[in-house]
Image: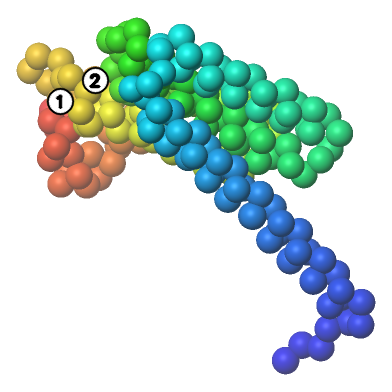
Amino acid sequence: MQVAAPGSQAAEAARWRQILARSAGLLAAALAGGSLVFWVAANWPRMTPDARLAGVQGTLGLLVVLAAGLAWRGNRWAEPMAGLAALATGALLALVGQIYQTGADAWELFLAWAVLILPWLVAVRSWFLALLWAALLNLALWLFLDGTSPRPPGGGGARRCHRAPGCWAWTGSCWRWPSACGRCGGIPGA
């Protein structure tokens, strides 16, 4: 049993308050981002394409300005605002893809989303943005390799994998654990 120093309990309580406040802010940002997506989905039939784009673009612009202003001041709410802006970026990409039927594969959209939020990740250094960015990259890689993306003639995802530098770990895991490659079409050149 360790005995705490007299002032350490107050410092520990303050640290926990800060952690809880930051976690609540990130949860609020995630819920607000989800509400934006659900609001657009609920009002979809009543809105014109221009109104849809203007609404999401305006929201994204407002969130970016708020996040930049809060980050400039060193305010703790910059992190949740940047998280909301990152989610609004994904909503805007999905909306543009639906309205204009860009024909892009899903993995390209998730990769574009990850690239677009990378500056915010570097500027704000948020765990939420880091996890979102990692999830987007993983999802883009999965869709590129094995997901619902169209496959090239006569090959699976692993045949495409040897052309992408980020896929060498996946190819290495196929050699180490061949059962993991059952869905991807085998090892390139094997």
The residue lying furthest to the front in this view is: 46
Say which mark, if any, is on residue 79: none
Say which mark, if any, is on residue 156: 1
In terms of image quadrants, where is residue 21?
bottom right
The residue drawn where x is 86% and y is 74% is 10
Q: Residues within 10 Å of mark 1 (few under 14, many from 20)?
A: many
Q: Residues within 10 Å of mark 2 (few under 14, many from 20)?
A: some
The residue drawn where x is 22% and y is 31% is 147
Say which mark, if any, is on residue 160: 2
* Residue 170 relative to residue 69: left or right: left
* Residue 183 relative to residue 42: left or right: left
Classify the position of the N terminus by image quarter: bottom right
Q: Measure how far apart labels 1 and 2 are at the Cα level.
A: 7 Å
Classify the position of the C terminus by image quarter: top left
In terms of image quadrants, where is residue 47?
top left
Camera-side residue of 164 and 76:
76
Q: Residue 153, relative to residue 4: is it above or below? A: above
The residue lying furthest to the right in this view is: 7
The residue drawn where x is 89% and y is 82% is 5
Q: Is residue 133 visible?
A: no
Residue type at mark 1 is Gly
In what element is the residue under mark 1?
loop
Q: Would you say the residues marked 1 and 2 are in contact, meaning their CB atoms lie under 8 Å apart?
A: yes
Residue type at mark 2 is Arg
Q: Position of residue 42 (x, y in %)?
A: 38, 33
The residue drawn where x is 59% and y is 23% is 60
Camera-side residue of 36 and 146:
36
In what element is the residue under mark 2?
helix
Q: Position of residue 19 (x, y in %)?
A: 70, 59
Q: Position of residue 55 (x, y in %)?
A: 53, 19
